[in-house]
């Protein structure tokens, strides 16, 4: 069940169904009768004397809303699931129009001294909203917008190297970055300052270095050289140049779309973008965008048609 897949049109369908259910308990007919021999002067749709108003107007309308919402909750899993050639939401649209047609016909006729009560008029209003939201839910842009959005806070600006820019949350104090010495100091976090003997981690002048430390330094140098060569090979491959005037922005997709790898668009997808969630576009490559997921994964979105900017 994906609550983020619900739209404002689905909310209108649910609200109309609740209003229709309430209207079924309100007076549907009122009798103009005065005197001590007059009994109950009103009756609602649940009274058997009004059959078949209850199943053809009220229950059919509520069933239509239930079918539409069930289809939305199932999402893409029920996109191709059909009953007698129609999806559940298509059956719901047909039932809502049929219920509205029956409600309009029930307002006609009548006898002298018998008038339609608030329940009848409220049912017609609820069915107009229900049929309109059901039929126009995928056509009117306002009704297609997500009901619940998940827009994260704007990311903090970062300097090259991954450290927060001045004035941003998480910036270290004036004595330097966390874990690194301040200007003019040779020691870092957990290491002594140069010239202070006897500190933990200090090495006396002339003491031979540990063999394990030499091996670790050699391994780090080999990894750095391999990373440099890989970066050189990657830079040699032709890639679309990012837009010069591009600025990161939030966006949402109208339908689920796959996210291709940044370095190899032909590779396996690295993630999926779903409606109702905001994603950050960090780069533009021609008509494609480089999007970032909530876990920090970045990939190329080739199909940018119909996206909604935040």
Image: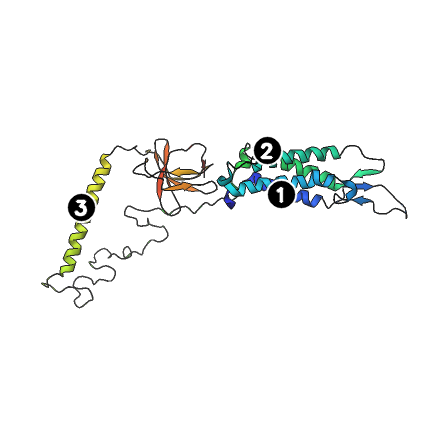
Q: Earlier in the sequence, mark 3 or mark 2?
A: 2
Residue lying farthest to the left in this orientation: 206
Question: Could you tell me residue 111's position as x and y percent?
Answer: 83, 35
Q: Earlier in the sequence, mark 2 or mark 1?
A: 1
- Image point (70%, 38%), residue name: 57
| Label 1 sits on residue | 15
Quadrant in the rendering for residue 232? top left
Earlier-in-chain disc, 1 versus 3: 1
Check disc 2: other Cα within 10 Å, few if <14, some if 14-19, many if 20+.
Answer: some
**Secondary structure found at label 3:** helix
Image point (66%, 35%), residue name: 128
Residue 238 image-quadrant placement? top left
Please indicate, yes or no, whether residue 106 appears anywhere in the rendered image.
yes
The furthest residue to the right = 36
Is residue 16 in view from this perspective? no
- From the viewer's perspective, is the residue at label 3 or at label 2 nearer? 2
| Crowding near the residue tagged with mark 1, few <14, some 14–19, many ≥20 C-alpha atoms within 10 Å | some
Q: In terms of depth relative to the viewer, which is nearer, 113 or 208? A: 113
In the figure, is residue 291 to the left or right of 183? right
Q: Split into 4 quadrants, where in the image is the C terminus?
A: top left
Residue 103 in the image: state x and y as whole percent: 71, 35
- Give the percent coordinates (x, y) of residue 189: 25, 60
Disc 1 element: helix
Would you name the residue on which mark 2 appears? 135
Taking the spot 62% from the left edge, 43% from the top edge, the residue there is 15
Secondary structure under badge 2?
helix
Q: Quick check: 62 above or below 287? A: below
Q: Which residue is the site of mark 3? A: 225
């Amino acid at each position: 069940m994906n609550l983020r897949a619900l739209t404002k049109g689905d909310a209108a369908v649910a609200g109309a169904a609740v209003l229709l259910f309430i209207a079924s308990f309100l007076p549907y007919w009122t009798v103009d009768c005065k005197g001590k021999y007059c009994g109950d002067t009103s009756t609602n749709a649940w009274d058997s004397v009004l059959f078949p108003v209850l199943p053809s107007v009220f229950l059919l309308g509520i069933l239509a809303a239930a079918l539409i919402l069930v289809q939305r909750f199932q999402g893409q899993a029920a996109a191709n699931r059909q009953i007698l050639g129609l999806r559940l939401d298509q059956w719901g649209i047909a039932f809502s129009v049929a219920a509205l047609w029956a409600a309009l016909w029930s307002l006609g006729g009548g006898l002298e001294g018998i008038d339609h009560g608030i329940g009848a008029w409220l049912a017609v209003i609820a069915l107009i909203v229900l049929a309109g939201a059901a039929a126009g839910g995928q056509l009117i842009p306002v009704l297609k917008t997500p009901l619940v959005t998940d827009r994260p806070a704007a990311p903090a600006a970062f300097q090259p190297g991954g450290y927060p820019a001045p004035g941003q949350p998480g910036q270290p104090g004036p004595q330097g970055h966390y874990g690194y010495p301040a200007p003019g100091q040779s020691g870092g976090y957990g290491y002594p300052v140069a010239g202070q003997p006897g500190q933990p981690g200090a090495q006396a002048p002339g003491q031979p270095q540990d063999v394990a430390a030499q091996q670790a330094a050699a391994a780090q140098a080999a990894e750095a050289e391999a990373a440099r060569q890989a970066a050189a090979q990657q830079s040699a491959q032709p890639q679309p140049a990012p837009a010069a005037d591009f600025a990161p922005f939030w966006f949402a997709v109208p339908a689920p779309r796959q996210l291709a790898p940044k370095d190899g668009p032909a590779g396996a997808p690295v993630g999926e973008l779903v409606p109702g969630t905001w994603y950050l576009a960090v780069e533009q490559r021609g008509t494609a965008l480089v999007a970032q997921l909530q876990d920090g994964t970045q990939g190329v979105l080739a199909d940018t048609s119909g996206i909604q900017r935040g």
